[in-house]
Amino acid sequence: MNESEHVQSALGADCLSDEPLLFATALTKLFPGVRALDKADFSIAPGEIVALLGQNGAGKSTLIQIFAGAHAAGSYDGTISFDGKPFRPGDIAEAEAAGVALVPQEVNIVPDLSVAENITLNNEPLRWGIVDVSKRLLQAKKALADFDIDVDPLLPMSSLDLASQQLVVIARALSKNARLLILDEPTAALTEHESVLLFDRMRLLKKRGVAIIFVSHRLGEVFAISDRIVVMRDGRICGWHLTADTTRGDVVAEMIGETVSLSEPIMSREFGKAALEIRNLDVFEIEGRKRVKSLNLAVRKGEVVGLFGLLGAGCTEAALAIFGAWKGKREGKILIDGVEREINSPNEAVSLGLGLMAQDRRDCLIGDQSVGDNIGIASLGKIVRHGMLDIAEGRRRARKQFDALHIKAGSIDAEVQTLSGGNQQKVQIARWLAANTRILIMVDPTRGVDVGARREIKETWLELSTKGHAILLASTDAEELVDACDRVVVLSQGRKVGELTGPELTEKNLLRMATDG
């Protein structure tokens, strides 16, 4: 059965039309050395929510970017119709004018502009040729109110946390009266409450006839919100399913190309002495407000310790402060292998054997530099020979990790910004493996990463732990922590409220402790 037949079988009670709103046939897109799309077909009907699944590098991003006009007509083969007419947008503005809006995974904002200015960007209300500031404020307030976002529209976007920025970007897309809304990992930075709010809005839009393409690696969300699931692998559409008629296992098997377990228990291991110890850590905002209060924790050699809390609990702040990357004040003691150390910058942390995988990979990767250069940047001090960089040795180290982590790219010389999100995360891990890091701090390392890449990343850090590395994993994903950690320290409002291990380490207990604390 082809995509046209599948979408026709999906239309009916849950959809508002018996004809597709968007219909794409034989889409093929080439990048240097990579066939990103290979004769991919896709359809979606008005009032339908279609989940688009696949491993990173499967072609999802390329497909939705074509629909959104990010890849201009003429740069790919195949045909697309929208509302029964040929659809060949030359850029994002043309796609938006036609009624197609994309909310990207990495928030697209102008940090120095206000929330209101970001919401109305390129769509400002004018009066006598000048921006009508009062009307702009009213439009922004309406967009925020429609999405139930409690944010002052006059605040600069840079003052909002990542989750709030994401919600504002979604509100901006909804304010443009899109007929097809494309959401790329929209819940990756959201709390459970914010995700529920988003899903409520998605259902409302569905009732209004808006078609929604929902890209997510969180299978629980996919099965809760979608009408139909489309699976991609190696640039092709390899599966179409009515959500009610399939299972997680079937979908994952199609994504990976093999039958896999969604969760594999970690093996018990022997732990050594404390590699990292934190005593009475206080972390302050630049304005002086305390974000982390008297935190004590230790990570032993060979141990994976989780740091869990709801958004704003202080986990990210603690992780950044330990690595010397927090911009505000920090007090307390940090011990490495039992010796107190001063870590006031990332350079000092790296020199002591620490590595950091940041929540937002754009903070750690140089987009227009090659994969090899990004892997090798933390190892430069280790490849100096007679006062000069040994370029060949640096490339050998980078190539070793590139191959070991199965990073999917045209070559090791490809710009890292051309890689999928999951492969960019692998580049971060490869960087620290090449630098022989002994203590790895990770902040939401699998945010926006598919099931297959998530499994590979987890296997990588568990392999590191078996070799004696100490891993501190800060995450808002309770399922990930239960699946990957030996112990989990729970924070609430900046304070440690408990610690779970063994049979007590469950998602339910983590969430209860984080909310009750």
Image (cartoon, rainbow, N blue to C red):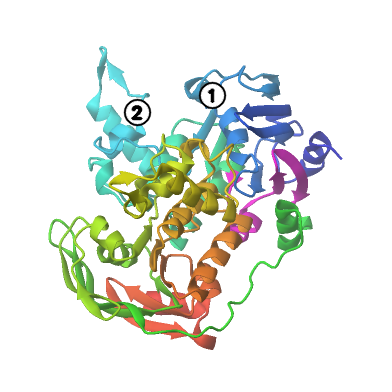
Residue 472 drawn at (x, y percent): 39, 70
Residue 400 drawn at (x, y percent): 54, 53
In which quarter of the view is residue 309 placed? Answer: bottom left
Q: Would you call the spot at circle 2 few (<14 residues within 10 Å), some (14-19), or many (20 or more)?
A: some
Q: Residue at x 59, y 80 (%)?
A: 267
Q: Amino acid at mark 1?
A: Ala
Q: How far apart are labels 2 and 1 at the CA level?
A: 16 Å
Residue furthest front in the image = 386
In the image: residue 308, left or right of residue 52:
left
**Which portion, as a residue range, is magenta?**
214-242
In the image: residue 308, left or right of residue 250:
left
Q: Element under label 1?
A: helix
Residue on which disc 1 sits: 95
Which of the marked residues, 2 or 1, is nearer the chain's N terminus? 1
Residue on which disc 2 sits: 121
Q: Amino acid at mark 2?
A: Leu
Residue 482 drawn at (x, y percent): 52, 75
Residue furthest left in the image = 288
The image shows residue 250, relative to residue 386, as above or below, that is below
The image shows residue 179, relative to residue 456, as above or below, that is above
Residue furthest right in the image = 1
Q: Is residue 169 visible?
A: yes
Looking at this view, is 279 or 340 the one in front? 340
